[in-house]
Amino acid sequence: MTQQDLQQINERGMNVGQIRRQLEFIKKGFPYLRLKAAASTELGVMSFDEIQKQHYIEVWNQFLKGDNRIVKFVPASGAASRMFKNLYAFLNSEEQTPQTEYEIQFFRNIHKFAFFEGLDNKCQENELKGVHQLILEGKYKKVIENLLELKGLGYGHLPKGLLLFHQYEDVARTSMEEHLVEAALYASSHGVTFVHFTVSHEHLALFKQRVEKVVERFSERYQLKYAISFSEQKPSTDTIAANLDNTPFRNSDGSLLFRPGGHGALIENLNDIDADVVFIKNIDNVVPDRWKADTVTFKQVIGGVLVDLQKKSFNYLRLLDSGKYNHVMLEEMIRFLQRDLSCRNESLKYMEDAELTVYLKKKLNRPMRVCGVVRNEGEPGGGPFITIDSDGSTSLQILESTQVNMDNPEYAKMLKQSTYFNPVDLVCSLKDYKGNHYHLPDFVDPSTGFISAKSKDGKELKALELPGLWNGAMSHWNTVFVEVPLSTFNPVKTVNDLLKPQHQ
């Protein structure tokens, strides 16, 4: 490390020790997790009937009446460029007319997109002809240019949160606005709704402009006040890039190359949130109002489950603090850990009461999250599993396929036959039983990141991804899985997803 390197590291709010650890991970890689089973309704996933659902909805609504702050936390820094991958491919091809089924579907239904009116206006402005006239003349690429490029709507340069997703009678809404509506419906308390978006620096001003434009309309509609805040990923959470020989990758000017550490970096942003309970949901998983009923119902359900389990956990911790407990009470706490939190440890039977007390305090006094999971219908991404921790106890975890050793036939079978998928539908408790905010970085498992292959200026490099926000960054939380219906999971991965009935 040169003096210039040290200065660069310090200016980012990092230290040499961090850099060395990151380079060591890049060199050695990350260990696979030890799996016990894929979570299921028989093992680790709660599923409720109507009476149970109503019970938890009532628990949640009672919680809203108390002196509690609820925040909706939405990671919204992701660029929308991947949504238009197919359209970019068409734009850069030699073909002048749509060839693939995807391209044909896009142009055949172009009038159904919420952004159609704006696109038509841009085409009139730049090409002196509307969308339909350009299509009639075979100028398909002019339409795409006006959609994606900065001379038009610039959708290829915007984040998903600022794209118009849904058309209503009198107005079109961005995905960010749909989150504001959702928050009003299940996360407002005492007439105030707190919503927090994590955004990239280059888009912060645009987000603020859009909020300023729409917030009064939603405030009047739902008769409440919005408290909307933003944060950016911290430079201190970036990771160093490495050459293929594991030495630090350097830019052309000799400086070290740092890259964003992935959504796991947002555990620092979440740690800064002042809240008792936080809902976390991806920016692109929203639906128009007429489809929101199931989403609202099950957000209230998982909120009620969290509040119920948190109350029991807090009562046990206070009892342990008081010293007024006996062995029978300790056994009750163990059953709570095993039955409700799927945390089992065979060695407990050999522990004395004093040792049991220490173990129970450690396991109960942790942040808690309840995760909605949906039936697996082939979507790529993480799933709910029961894993074996370093101390021999089991815990519920959301895993990515990269964390599973596919050379282990048993594990490969578990992954293939898993029946549930993680739609990123979380409600989290961030304060302990004394009302103190947990320091969330303390509960990250640093050994759960992964290495990906990237390139810069034509040179290949190794990039280090931090433990994912809902994966390794929450490894040492208490976790509960609740089955939610597939109707609550409607992500927009490509622009044509907006043509599905749930987005029309």
Image (cartoon, helix red, strand yellow):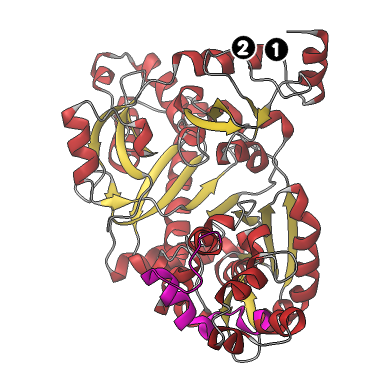
Report the side of 73 relative to 305 (left or right): right
Q: Which residue is mark 2?
A: 20
Report the side of 393 relative to 151 (left or right): left
Q: Residue furthest front?
A: 94
Graded by Cα atoms within 10 Å as few (under 14), some (14 to 19) or many (20 or more), the crowding at tag 2 reads: few
Report the side of 90 relative to 7 (left or right): left
Q: Which residue does the image show at 19% across and 45% down from the upper left?
A: 417
* Residue 140 percent location from the top left of the image: 55, 76
Q: Which residue does the image show at 55% across and 27% down from the upper left?
A: 460
Q: Which residue is mark 1?
A: 16
| Residue span colored magenta | 92-119
Report the side of 445 relative to 329 (left or right): right
Vertical placement of 240 versus 352: above or below?
below
Q: Quadrant of residue 157?
A: bottom right
Say if the magenta span includes residue 105: yes
Vertical placement of 207 versus 345: above or below?
below
Q: Is residue 318 visible?
A: no
Q: Which mark is residue 36?
A: none
Q: Amino acid at mark 1?
A: Val
Query: Helix or strand or loop: what does disc 1 sit on?
Result: helix
Between 480 and 114, the one lying in front of the other is 114
Inter-mark Cα distance, 1 to 2: 6 Å
Q: Amino acid at mark 2?
A: Arg
Q: Is residue 224 visible?
A: yes
Quadrant where the image shows the N terminus = top right
Query: Helix or strand or loop: what does disc 2 sit on?
Result: helix
Are dots 1 and 2 in contact, CB under 8 Å? yes
